[in-house]
Image (cartoon, rainbow, N blue to C red):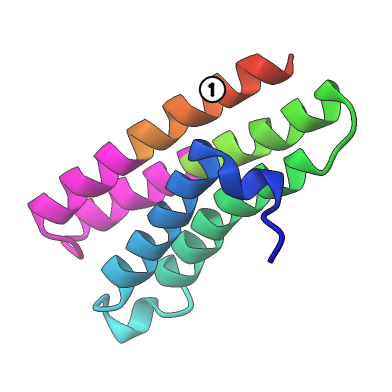
Amino acid sequence: MNMYSFEKLECWQHARKLAVWIYQSTSDFPEKERFGLVSQMRRAAISVASNIAEGTSRKTAKDQAHFSTIAYGSAIELLNQLIITNDLNYLSNQLYQQGRELLERQTILISKLRATQI
């Protein structure tokens, strides 16, 4: 089986881990949030990984950097949503801190990837 270039990127591998973490962490949210925060957070997490992957298929550094910028924006959107879920007491303090650490690492990795693209 062929391995695509994005699968080799630490940045994408971490984004995949982040997406799985978000899915698992939001599984116990109140049912009333199923189409609210849960859906938004899951879409943002998938967007991070998807835009990193899509960026690798682009030919120019400018196009690649554009998709990295979108991935970074989705990570910041996800951080905002994580903060709100903490305000609403949907996550334990331990899970909240773990999520922040994952997102901090993700934004650092995206920034490093983008620096190689411009």
Residue sticking out furthest to the bottom:
31
Please indicate whether residue 77 sits to the left or right of residue 5 in the image.
Answer: left
Which residue is located at x 74 percent, y 14 percent? 118
Residue 92 falls within the magenta-colored stretch: yes
Q: Nearer the viewer, residue 24 or 41?
A: 24
10 Å crowding of disc 1: few (<14), some (14-19), many (20+): some
Residue that label 1 marks: 111
Which residue is painted at 51% across and 38% down in the image?
A: 11
The furthest residue to the left? 93
Give the extent of the magenta segment.
76-102
Give the image location of residue 29, x and y in percent: 27, 75
Q: Position of residue 7 (x, y in %)?
A: 60, 50
Please state the horizontal and vertical placement of residue 75, each as a whole percent of the image: 49, 42
Position in image of residue 34 (x %, y %):
41, 80
* Magenta stretch contains residue 57: no
What amino acid is at disc 1?
Ser
Q: Quadrant of the N terminus?
A: bottom right
- Magenta segment's dominant SS is helix
Q: Residue at x 49, y 38 (%)?
A: 10
Q: Between 57 and 88, which is closer to the camera in this rendering?
A: 57
Residue at left offset 75%, top offset 48%: 54
